[in-house]
Amino acid sequence: MAAAAPSSRRPWVGGNWKAAATKATIGPVVEALNKSGEGFAAEVVIFPSAMHLESTKEALKVDAKIGVQNIHSAEKLGAFTGELVVPQVQDMGLEWVMVGHSERRHLFGEADAVVAEKARVALAAGLKVVVCVGEKLDEREAGQCRAVVVRQLDAVAAVVPAESWAASIVVAYEPVWAIGTGKVASAEQAQEAHKDIREWLEAKIGAAASAACRIVYGGSVKPGNCTGLGAQPDIDGFLVGGAALKPEFVDIIRGAQA
Ligand SMILES: O=C(CO)COP(=O)(O)O
């Protein structure tokens, strides 16, 4: 049942630029990342909008990967106006796909099975996947935090190969009430949810997956609160929204170098 020491998992930090970025906001962030002039201890993945994938990829000169914020579940190119499909992600030379962000689930009505199918298609093509999970405030207040997260993860586990969890999946725990609200989960609240997820991994997938899978926290992460969160044994990094569009994002990446 004991989780592996945090140092055995490479920290992972994602920057989710949502539909909030323009050239004017992206420029200084890319400049700060490039100026940092260091190989980060953390694995860094930036998720620009589709509009900014190529320009961001070309502008970044540090060891940071680029991923897409969402995909359509079709396996092939085709007539899917307004969507991105896996072959296009591969054509761009990108490795990462995000699925199940709470804004996809709650603003755009994506059900657990839809999120799971997107993960399955991306993994089958050899891409890496960030699976976002997290409860809404009313669910937390009703004591359903663990049940909601387990339901969301069970849907993914039902369709993806067990071996994907160790090497190709990052789980992002993002409580909906903490996203974009400034109400960060306390280190204790986040650790409790991450421990639930690690225990779920051990029971459902196996001890090796539980020890190896990175579980990252998202929701109002800032340079001032990332150290306490990152010190928790089951928090392996962050998925950052608003603060990933500021040069201080570099400080959060450094904060994950525990
Ligand atoms: O949704 C998030 C990252 O995916 C978190 O957003 P904020 O960091 O702006 O709260």
Image: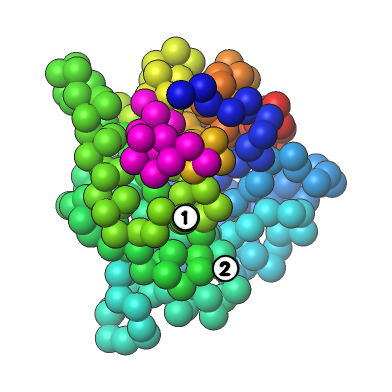
Taking the view exactly as shown, the residue that stands out farthest to the bottom is: 78
Residue drawn 44% across the image and 64% down it: 123
Indicate the position of residue 13 as horizontal and vertical percent values.
59, 41
- Crowding near the residue tagged with mark 2, few <14, some 14–19, many ≥20 C-alpha atoms within 10 Å: some
How many numbered circles does the render carry?
2
Indicate the position of residue 83 as horizontal and vertical percent values.
33, 72
- Residue 109 lies within the magenta run: no
Q: What's the magenta region?
A: 196-208
Mark 2: which secondary structure? loop
Mark 1: which secondary structure? loop
- Crowding near the residue tagged with mark 1, few <14, some 14–19, many ≥20 C-alpha atoms within 10 Å: few
- How far is mark 2 from mark 1, CA to CA? 21 Å
Q: Are marks 2 and 1 in contact (CB under 8 Å)?
A: no
Q: Nearer the viewer, residue 67 or 203?
A: 203
Residue drawn 66% across the image and 40% down it: 10
Name the disc covering residue 15, or none: none
Disc 1 designates what residue? 163
Let me know if residue 184 appears in the view: no
Indicate the position of residue 167 as horizontal and vertical percent values.
55, 52
Q: Amino acid at mark 1?
A: Glu
Q: Amino acid at mark 2?
A: Leu
Look at the picture and state if 252 lies above or below 70.
Answer: above
Residue drawn 70% across the image and 63% down it: 59
Instruction: Please tell me whether the stretch drawn in magenta is mainly helix, strand or loop.
Output: helix
Query: Residue 191's image quarter?
Result: top left
Disc 2 designates what residue? 94
Lateral position of residue 111 relative to residue 166, left or right:
left
Lateral position of residue 227 relative to residue 131, left or right:
right
Which of disc 1 and disc 2 is earlier in sequence? 2
Q: Nearer the viewer, residue 203 or 105?
A: 203
Query: Residue 181's image quarter?
Result: top left
